Image (cartoon, grey):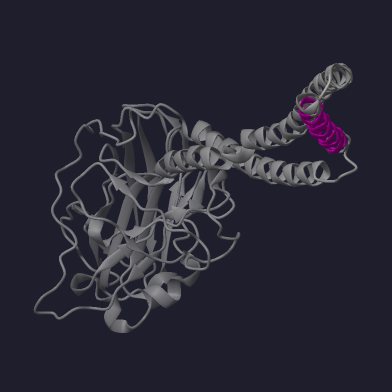
C-alpha cells in the first residue's frame, strides 16, 4: 500500500488574527506505544475483506434461491390446479364416486323407509309376510349403500389429502428459502460494517517521523544535508511509507529547489507534485527505527523568503490498510545568495493540527479496497471518503482532492501563499494503482 499527499494552501486570513497551525514540539524522544482502536480486532484486514465478499455472495445466492423457489412454487401450484394433474384428477374421480354413493344411499334409505311403511299398513298375514320380506331386502340394500358411501368418502378424503399434501409440500420447499435473503442480508451488513471499520484510517501517535539537522536558515546557492528518523512506537509490525514534503513558500520559485533522498543505492529526486513518499519500509517491527538521508539544494536565483518541510508516517498493517502517524512541520528561512547566516540552529518541529488535516481518499486498487472510484479519477469524482478513527482527542479531518489538481488548490492567489498568516492543509490518500 502506498499513500499520497498533495499540498494545498488556503487563502490568507487577516494579519491581525493569524491562524496558528503549529505549536512547539519537544525534541526527538523514544516513541511511546500507541493505542489503536482496533488492536483487539479478532480478524485481519484480509480476513474481514474475504468475510464481506463471502457474505455478499451468500446474500446474492439467497436472493437468487428465493426467486427460483418462488417461481418453482408458482409452477407447482399451477400444475396441481389443472384437472389433468394425476392427483387432482384422482381427487375429482373420487369426488364423483362419493357423490354417486351418496345418491345410492339416499335411494336405499328411502326404499327402507317405504318398506317399513308398507309393513305397518299390511292388513293380513300374507301382506305382512310380503312386506317383511321387502323390508329385510331394503335393510340389506341400505346397509350396502351406507358401507359403499363410507368407503367412497374415505377414498375421496384420501385423494383430497394427497392433492393438498402435494401443494403443502411445494409451499414448504419454498419456505426453506423464503427467509434466507433477510437472514443473509443481516450477516452481510454485519460483515460490511466490520470491514468498513478496518477500512477506515486509524490515527496513531507512536508512528513518528522527525527531521535531524534540517537548518532553520538556508542560503540560496547552497546545498544542505539532513535526515529524518522513522520510529515505530506502536505495538504492531507496519509497512511504512514515510512522507517527506519540502517546498519554498513562493510557488514561482519551486523550480529553484531540488530535494533528494537516498534509497541506499543513490540519490533520487523528491517530486512533491506527484509522489511525496520515500524509502518504503516493508516490515517495520515495534521499536524499530530507520534513518533516511536527504539533501536540499536551493538555486542562487531564489529570492530571500521562507520554506517549510513536512514529515509523517503513512503505513498499513494486517488489520488496517491506512495507519497515519502525526505530521511534523519545520519552517526555515531562505537567505539571499552569498548571505552570511552566522551560527544556524536546527529548525524546530511543530505539529500540524488534526482539524486541518483532510480526509484521505481510498484508492480502489490499494489492498483490494472497495471504493467505487475509477483508476485515475480525482477525488470527488467517485472516490468514497474514509472517516478517520483517532486514538487521540483530536478532531476529525477535512475533505480534500487529489494532487492532480494541486496548482488549482495550492496556487489560488499570491495572498494564499503567506503561510505564516494562512492555513496549511496536507492531504493523505492512497496512491492510485499501488497495492
Identify which residue, 112 or 322, lies in the foreground: 112
Q: Find residue 249 and report its image quarter.
A: bottom left
Q: Would residue 240 be visible to someone looking at this image? A: no
x, y (%) of residue 348? 18, 53
* Side of 239 where 333 appears, left or right: left
* Side of 387 where 159 appears, left or right: right
Q: Find residue 355 and report its image quarter.
A: bottom left
Q: Is residue 9 above or below residue 394?
A: below
Q: Is residue 10 above or below residue 134?
A: below
x, y (%) of residue 157? 75, 29
- Which residue is located at x 81 percent, y 41 percent? 80
Identify which residue, 415 or 265, lies in the foreground: 415
Dominant SS type (magenta): helix
Q: Which residues are magenta?
A: 91-117
Extreme residue in the front direction: 124
Please state the total of marks drawn on the protein image: 0
Magenta stretch: includes residue 105: yes
Q: Would residue 198 be visible to someone looking at this image? A: yes
- Which residue is located at x 43 percent, y 34 percent? 319
x, y (%) of residue 368? 57, 44
Amino acid at each position: 500500500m502506498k499513500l499520497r499527499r498533495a499540498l494545498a494552501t488556503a487563502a490568507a486570513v487577516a494579519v491581525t488574527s493569524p491562524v496558528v497551525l503549529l505549536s512547539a514540539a519537544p525534541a526527538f524522544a523514544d516513541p511511546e506505544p500507541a493505542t489503536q482502536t482496533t488492536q483487539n480486532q479478532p480478524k485481519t484486514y484480509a480476513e474481514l475483506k474475504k468475510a464481506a465478499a463471502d457474505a455478499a455472495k451468500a446474500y446474492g445466492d439467497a436472493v437468487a434461491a428465493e426467486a427460483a423457489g418462488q417461481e418453482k412454487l408458482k409452477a407447482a401450484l399451477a400444475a396441481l390446479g389443472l384437472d389433468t394433474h394425476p392427483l387432482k384428477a384422482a381427487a375429482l374421480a373420487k369426488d364423483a364416486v362419493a357423490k354417486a354413493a351418496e345418491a345410492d344411499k339416499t335411494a336405499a334409505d328411502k326404499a327402507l323407509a317405504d318398506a317399513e311403511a308398507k309393513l305397518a299398513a299390511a292388513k293380513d298375514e300374507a301382506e305382512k309376510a310380503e312386506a317383511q320380506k321387502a323390508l329385510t331386502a331394503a335393510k340389506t340394500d341400505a346397509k350396502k349403500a351406507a358401507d359403499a358411501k363410507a368407503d367412497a368418502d374415505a377414498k375421496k378424503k384420501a385423494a383430497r389429502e394427497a392433492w393438498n399434501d402435494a401443494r403443502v409440500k411445494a409451499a414448504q420447499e419454498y419456505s426453506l428459502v423464503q427467509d434466507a435473503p433477510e437472514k443473509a442480508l443481516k450477516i452481510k451488513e454485519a460483515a460490511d460494517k466490520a470491514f468498513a471499520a478496518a477500512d477506515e484510517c486509524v490515527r496513531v501517535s507512536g508512528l513518528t517521523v522527525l527531521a535531524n539537522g534540517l537548518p532553520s536558515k538556508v542560503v540560496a546557492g547552497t546545498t544542505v544535508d539532513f535526515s529524518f528518523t522513522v520510529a515505530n512506537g506502536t505495538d504492531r509490525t507496519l509497512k511504512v511509507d514515510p512522507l517527506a514534503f519540502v517546498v519554498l513558500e513562493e510557488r514561482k520559485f519551486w523550480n529553484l529547489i531540488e530535494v533528494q533522498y537516498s534509497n541506499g543505492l543513490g540519490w533520487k529526486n523528491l517530486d512533491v507534485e506527484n509522489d511525496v513518499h520515500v524509502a518504503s519500509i516493508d516490515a517495520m517491527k515495534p521499536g524499530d527505527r530507520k534513518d533516511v538521508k536527504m539533501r536540499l539544494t536551493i538555486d542562487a536565483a531564489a529570492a530571500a523568503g521562507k520554506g517549510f518541510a513536512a514529515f509523517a508516517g503513512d503505513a498499513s498493517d494486517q488489520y488496517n490498510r491506512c495507519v497515519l502517524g502525526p505530521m511534523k512541520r519545520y519552517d526555515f528561512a531562505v537567505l539571499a545568495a552569498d548571505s552570511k547566516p552566522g551560527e544556524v540552529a536546527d529548525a524546530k518541529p511543530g505539529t500540524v493540527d488534526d482539524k486541518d488535516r483532510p480526509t484521505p481518499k481510498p484508492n480502489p486498487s490499494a489492498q483490494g479496497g472497495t471504493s467505487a472510484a475509477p483508476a485515475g479519477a480525482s477525488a470527488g469524482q467517485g472516490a468514497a471518503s474514509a472517516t478517520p478513527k483517532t486514538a487521540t482527542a483530536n478532531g476529525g479531518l477535512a475533505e480534500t482532492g487529489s494532487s492532480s489538481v494541486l496548482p488549482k488548490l495550492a496556487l489560488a492567489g499570491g495572498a494564499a501563499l503567506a503561510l505564516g498568516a494562512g492555513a496549511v492543509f496536507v492531504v493523505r490518500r492512497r496512491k492510485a494503482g499501488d497495492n
